[in-house]
Amino acid sequence: MQGYAPIPAGTTLKNSLALLQANDDAAISNNSGTAFPTDNLLVGMTCFRTDLQLMHTLVSTNPVTWVAQKYLSVDGGAVDFLRIGSSADDSSGAKLQTTGSVSVNRLNGEGRILVGQNDGYFYGDASKAGWKSPTRGTWYYDFTAQNLFVQTNQVWHSGNFDPTAKLSLAGGTMTGDLTLKGNASNALHAVPKQQLDAAVGTGKNGFGSRTVSAADPSGGADGDIWYQV
């Protein structure tokens, strides 16, 4: 109910009882009603609008400005408007405004914040912080590795990857041995030593005996070379 009124100086206690009772009722009920109080306004007073089921606070008397506040309900209802601290951006339409910090499950487990039209969420726990979705992938910063991960793969950067230590696709000089996965099966494949040694063993590459003679070639085996002079 509404009806707050100052008690004039000099009013006897007997004559103040009704006014005191009315003022108590107004304070206890948060000036409840279907309209805002219009008389004896004080910045900071509240009004519970029974028609809107919203608590309002008077923040200015010139002009008269009431700010609606609706806090999270115990059954997880949505926030219509909640202002924590002061903000100069009330006209932006933001439902939650704060000049301080917002804590989400800092005691144990995983804290989550859901944003936008997707099934993912931003999260943080004792070992990492990032974003995850059961259908659209995951990225996170690992506190121990001190690096970003996409899915389970580390993101390479100048601190953990040296491009000068890798052979460019354009070519270059290797300072160590190169091990091939197996024998060449294509004309443009590199040939490993084991395949070359096997071919030389059959005499197909001309690494047999050498003969220098004025006579016509005779005898010999596959791979031999006869020089007639």
Image (tube, grey):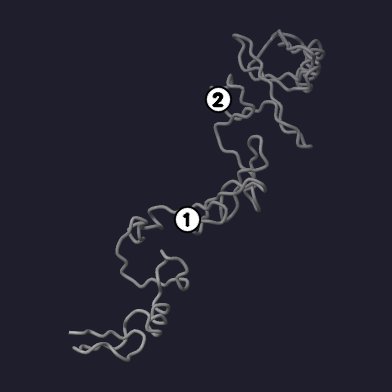
Q: Quadrant of the N terminus?
A: top right
Does 213 sit left or right of 171 as displayed?
Answer: left
Label 1's element? Answer: loop
Badge nearest the viewer, 1 or 2: 1
The reply to whether callout 1 and callout 2 are in contact (CB within 8 Å) is: no
Q: Looking at the picture, how far across and down is residue 22, in whole percent?
A: 80, 15
78 versus 197 height, above or below: above
Residue at x 36%, y 73% (from the top left corner): 177
Query: Residue 120: horizontal and vertical position, in percent?
Result: 65, 43
Q: CA distance from mark 1 to mark 2?
A: 35 Å
The residue most toward the bottom is 219
Q: Report the front residue among 229 and 165.
A: 229
Residue shown at the point (28%, 84%) measured from the top left: 225
The circle drawn on residue 194 is none
Question: Is 204 above or below relative to 42?
Answer: below
Kind of residue at badge 2: Ser
The amino acid sitting under disc 1 is: Gln
Q: Earlier in the sequence, mark 1 or mark 2?
A: 2
Q: Using residue 143 as the reference point, say whether residue 160 is left or right of it.
A: left
The answer to which quarter of the image holds residue 58 is top right
**Residue 87: mark:** 2
Quadrant housing residue 162: bottom left
Q: Residues within 10 Å of mark 2 (few under 14, many from 20)?
A: few
Furthest residue in direction front, as rendered: 216
Task: Using the image as rendered, state which of residue 10 and residue 100 is in the foreground.
Answer: 100
Instruction: Give the quarter of the image for residue 160.
Output: bottom left
- Pointer 1: residues within 10 angstroms few (<14), some, or many (20+)? few
Element on which disc 2 rests? loop
219 vs 119, nearest the viewer: 219
Q: Nearer the viewer, residue 54 or 164?
A: 164
* Residue 20 point in image, percent of width and height: 78, 16
Q: Residue 146, which numbered label?
A: 1
